[in-house]
Amino acid sequence: MEQVHPRLKDFIIEYCTKYKVKNIDPASLSTCTSIDLDLDIYDIEIDLFIDEFAQHFKVDASKFTWYKYGYPTGSAKVNMLKMVFGYKRRWVKRLAERWYKPKLRIATLQNALSTGKLI
C-alpha cells in the first residue's frame, strides 16, 4: 500500500480539525481512504475541500468535474450505521462500502500533487 504524502496528510488533518468534520487518526490515513465515506466530507463541504486543496497545493482544478466520480451526497443509511455501531469495525466499513460507493479517494489527490492537475 502506498504511503500518503506527508504534506497531504497534514492538510487533511488540519482541514478536518479546522472545520470540525471528524477526529482523524493520522495512522489510519492511506491512499485507499475515501474522502466522502471515511472522512464524512460530502455535499457542499466537498466543493470547499476541493477548492482549498487546489489553492493550498497550487493544483490546477479547472478541468475537474464530478461527472467522472459522481457527486458525493452521502447516505442516511450509512450515517445511521456509523452512529449505532461506530466506524472502526471492519464489518461496518465493508457494509458501508456496499451500501454507498465511495466517490473520491486520497489516491486521486495524491496523483494531483504529482501531476499538478486535479482531473
Image (cartoon, helix red, strand yellow):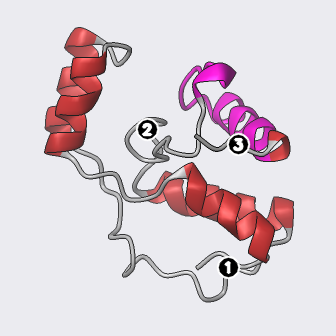
Q: Is residue 27 above or below residue 5?
A: above
Residue 69 lies in quadrant = bottom left
Instruction: Please report the bounds of the magenta region as a residue range.
Output: 8-28
Q: Which residue is mark 3?
A: 4
In the rendered structure, the answer to whether residue 95 lies left or right of residue 23 reads left
Of the image marks 2 and 1, the number of the one nearer the N terminus: 2
Numbered circle sitting on residue 19: none
Of the image marks 3 and 2, the number of the one nearer the N terminus: 3
Q: Amino acid at mark 2?
A: Asp
Residue 50 percent across, percent down from the top left: 62, 63
Circles 1 and 3: CB atoms closer than 8 Å: no
Numbered circle sitting on residue 40: 2
Q: Residue at x 65, y 75 (%)?
A: 118
Residue 67 percent across, percent down from the top left: 37, 81
Mark 3 or 2, which is nearer the eye?
A: 3
Total tally of numbered discs in the picture: 3
Q: Which residue is mark 1?
A: 61
Is residue 16 within the magenta segment? yes
Q: Amino acid at mark 1?
A: Ala
